[in-house]
Amino acid sequence: MKTETFSYLLAFTSEQVEKQIQYFLNNGCVISIEYSSQPGPALAFWDWWKLPLFNMRSVDEIMAEIEGCKANHSGSYIRITSYDNTRQSQVMSFVVHRPEG
């Protein structure tokens, strides 16, 4: 299923996800983690894993939150979304976890 910015590429490794997160943080973006059991064109809204991570400024903290979301929602798709609070818009999102099967 093609669901986001990088969906036509192979799945990212943890190191590649960390580099993308660092890019977002370096550019002042706010990151949120979202999940959905059945993403698709008809379901544009995903559930938030907590509120956007306004105060988290380290890659390790955000990766820990991603792992927490995976532990609680392993059967769901999980994505990271970055927001630019200056332009008040979403910058980019990509899936970091796909369910087995």
Image (tube, grey):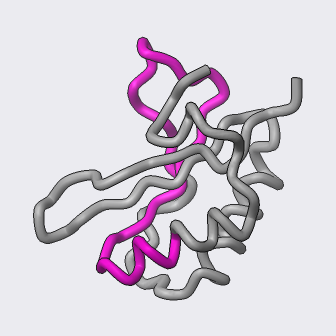
Q: Image check: 68 left or right of 85?
A: right
Closest to the observer, 8 or 64: 8
Give the percent coordinates (x, y) of residue 82: 38, 60
Q: Quadrant of residue 44?
A: top left
Number of marks drawn? 0
Closest to the observer, 63 or 17: 17
Q: Image check: 18 left or right of 72?
A: left
Q: Please, is residue 90 above or below residue 15 in the view? A: above
Q: Residue furthest front?
A: 9
Specify the quadrant that holds the C terminus: top right
Q: Please, is residue 95 above or below residue 19 in the view? A: above
Q: Name the residue at 77% across, 52% down.
A: 70
* Boundaries of the magenta span: 21-48
Q: Please, is residue 44 above or below residue 87 in the view? A: above
Give the percent coordinates (x, y) of residue 25: 41, 79
- Asked if residue 51 is among those painted magenta in the image, a careful observer would answer no
Q: Residue furthest right?
A: 101
Give the percent coordinates (x, y) of residue 17: 63, 63
Q: Please, is residue 33 above or below residue 23 in the view? A: above
- Asked if residue 45 is among those painted magenta in the image, a careful observer would answer yes
Specify the quadrant that holds the N terminus: top right
Give the percent coordinates (x, y) of residue 96: 65, 50
Q: Name the residue at 42% across, 64% down.
A: 52
Q: Name the residue at 79% across, 33% down.
A: 99
Q: Image check: 48 left or right of 65?
A: left
